[in-house]
Amino acid sequence: MTQGSLATGASAGLSPGPSSGPQSANLADILERVLDKGIVIAGDIKVNLLDIELLTIKLRLVIASLDTASQVGINWWQADPWLSADAANGSNSRELEDSNRRELEEENRQLRSRVKALEARSRDGG
């Protein structure tokens, strides 16, 4: 009998009340939904003096899970060595360097062929 009264007393004492129970469940649902879908909050602050714009501040806040952010193309943290072990080890930077090198080599080839064409045109009297 004492166990039953202790359990009843304990559950009554620990219960936060009827109004806070559903709110925490709603808050968890809202948080899950926001992280799943993402939310963007944007705003601009402009300071003018006599119709002269002195200062403009653009604020953008994105709240989303990492998976959701990656799906929409927001993945800056993957190249940040402070936030990504791969970036800290240099694997992402090596890939970027290889990609940049290939792009530069291709651009160099194109420029050389254009220079040759221009030189040939000038020799031919163009």
Image: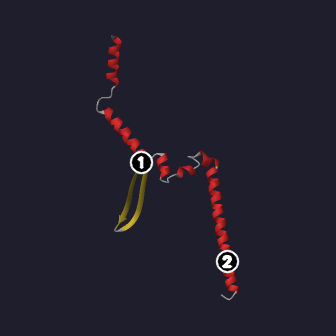
Residue marked by disc 1 = 37
Q: Position of residue 31 (x, y in %)?
A: 39, 42
Q: Secondary structure at mark 2?
A: helix
Identify which amino acid the numbered label 2 is placed on: Val
Q: Residue 38 or 19: which is nearer the viewer?
A: 38
Residue name at image x 38 percent, y 56 percent: 43
Residue marked by disc 2 = 115
Q: Is residue 116 left or right of residue 58?
A: right
Distance from disc 1 to disc 2, alpha carbons, whole Å, reads 51 Å
Q: Quadrant of the C terminus?
A: bottom right
Q: Residue 63 or 46: which is nearer the viewer?
A: 63
Q: Earlier in the sequence, mark 1 or mark 2?
A: 1
Q: Residue 20 or 98: which is nearer the viewer?
A: 98
Residue name at image x 56 percent, y 49 percent: 78
Find the residue positioned furthest to the top: 1
Count numbered badges in the picture: 2
Residue name at image x 38 percent, y 59 percent: 45
Identify which amino acid the numbered label 1 is placed on: Lys
Residue name at image x 32 percent, y 32 percent: 21
Instruction: Determine whether 76 is above or below 114 in the image.
Output: above
Q: Position of residue 73 (x, y in %)?
A: 50, 54
**Mark 1 Cα shell of 10 Å, populated few (<14), some (14-19), many (≥20):** few
